[in-house]
Image (cartoon, rainbow, N blue to C red):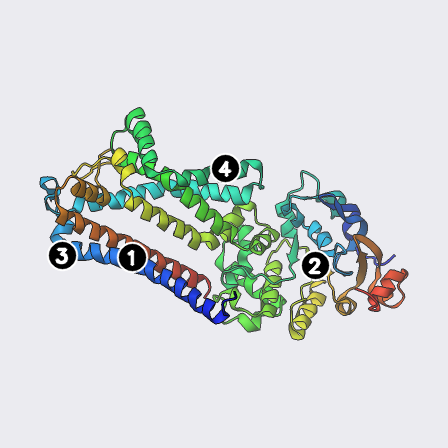
Amino acid sequence: MRVPPKITQAVAVTILGGATFLTVAILVFIIGFVLSKGLPGVNAEFLLSAPKDLGRTGGIFVTIVGSVLLPLIAVAIALPLGVGTAVYLSEYTRETQFTRALRFGTDCLAGIPSIIFGLFGFIFFVMMLKMGWCLLSGGLTLAIMVLPTIIRTSEEAIRAVPNAYREVSFSLGATRWETVLKVVLPNALPGIVTGVMLAIGRSIGETAAVIFTAGSSLRMPSSMFDSVRTMSVHFYILATEGISDEKAYATAAVLILAVLLVNLAAYGMMHRFISRRAR
Amino acid sequence: MISHSPIKISIQDFHVFHEKIEALRGITLDVRANRILSVIGPSGAGKTTFLRALNRLNDLVPELHVEGRVLLDGQDIYHPDFDVVSLRKRVGMLFALPVALPMSIYENVVYGPRLSGVRDRARLSEIVERSLKAAFIWDEVKDRLQMSGLRLSGGQQQRLCLARVLAMEEMEVILLDEPCSGLDPISTAKIEEALTILKARYTIILVTNNTKQAARVADETAFFLTGEMVEYGHTEQIFTVPRDKRTNDYVTGRFG
């Protein structure tokens, strides 16, 4: 039996539209739920004062510092490594068995649960290298964790740069390196920035890998070798140890807003960059 | 003897292989300085491969390899000691599709000079003005040099690309790969006019699908067919009394 096209069309629109609506609804519900339970507890004092009594009272300033520093360290390490790898893979090598294996390897790395990175970071950085729970251990671990994301997004962005640009650059006597620097990377930048933002988002939200490597100290770090607690770890501890639901939600609300802000800033930056070049 | 000007590029039994396929089958040809040589022939004749071999842009295609010699001022450009970067600064190229780099008109023009180490602003400005004038586009863009090159029309972009090549002070040979294939008649006329003036200073090789264009601007013409050079001679001779029947068929429009 043939279903009339008009009906299949209507069914398709309903299903697809429904799926879209459901997705958005779930997202809005989660964000709304967290914000409605958390925002009442958020004020300047909560943001800017130190936690007291394990976080039962006081603020979360230390954890905000942790959540800013840790992703920054991670990206500062992963960005040159990742973009360098991406440039090497796409500009300096031919497609061989080796590059395919390398790419497969990074893809596998991307699929590993974060707790495994945490465990590795704990055994390698914290114990073997005797760095202890600290910003640097956590930053290095997170850097390894986000490296695949940065490599793959950068590589895709680099490959999307029209080959004609490279040919023009070479034909004007540029070396490969000059071409990468003056033509390839500037045009791949929006994509690379997207990768960095994804990496920051993943780092800010990460809990398991951070507890194992950066620890959960509530004291303000004074060097790279001090332990630190991030907002996500703080939230996790507050919630699982039943310390304070109210503070946990307030922390979560700040975390969500922070991620939102990072993304907005990224879009703004990218937009300005693109419009400046196309002026 | 076709011309008495000195030999600029001497191509000697030159072959290009694309994996197993022979794209150029032993081309032997002398290109005279300060002349316009046009290379005509149907698509698939190897014209573009030939052109891209002359500034070694084919190096970017790993599947290609070459045999034979190409001498620029007597030096073999495929010799392992020959510096390919300096070659490309002397032998410039204009592509079939005009490609303005996604940067300002000014930056497009100074791309080459900057690579050669020119930093002085006054000198760069002077280069920009001289090049854009020589490419017949100065009047159209002089008030908006900071505008993105991408916002120019196709014909303007192609002249910008020409200016970009002319901006390089080391430039001696200009290769043009069907530079007018996508352009309107007015832009085409401007490019052709520029070429006839530029040959006083440069050696020009023009690959074209447009036999009329070859007849208009070229001093010498070479006819390529399936990777071979069928005939080479004065443009007038090629178009009026071709020696080879295949040349005759092509230039009279019987195929191609």
- Residue B256 visible within the image: yes
Which chain is home to disc 3?
Answer: A
Q: Which residue is mark 1?
A: A26
Q: CA distance from mark 1 to mark 4?
A: 37 Å
Q: Which mark is residue A256?
A: none
Q: Are marks 1 and 4 on the same chain?
A: yes
Q: Quadrant of the C terminus of chain A?
A: bottom left
The reply to whether the C-beta atoms of the residues labelled 3 and 1 are less than 8 Å apart is no
Q: Quadrant of residue B4?
A: bottom right
User: In the image, what residue occupies the spot 50% across and 72% down?
Assistant: B143
Type of amino acid at the residue the image marks with label 2: Tyr
Q: Which residue is mark 4?
A: A102
Q: Nearer the viewer, mark 3 or mark 2?
A: 3
Label 4 element class: helix
Q: Which mark is residue A40?
A: 3
User: In the image, what residue occupies the spot 56% across and 66% down?
Assistant: B129
User: Which residue is farthest front?
Assistant: A1
User: In the image, what residue occupies the spot 36% across and 63% down?
Assistant: A18
Label 2 element class: loop
Q: Quadrant of residue B162?
A: bottom right
User: Percent x, y for residue A203?
Assistant: 31, 44
Apparent side of residue B29 relative to residue A75 in the rendered image (left or right): right
User: Percent x, y for residue B42?
Assistant: 77, 61
Which chain is home to disc 4?
Answer: A
Type of amino acid at the residue the image marks with label 1: Ile
Relative to A274, is A100 above or below?
A: above
The reply to whether the C-beta atoms of the residues labelled 1 and 4 are less than 8 Å apart is no
Type of amino acid at the residue the image marks with label 4: Leu
- Closer to the camera in the image, B133 or A100: A100
Q: Which residue is mark 2?
A: B202
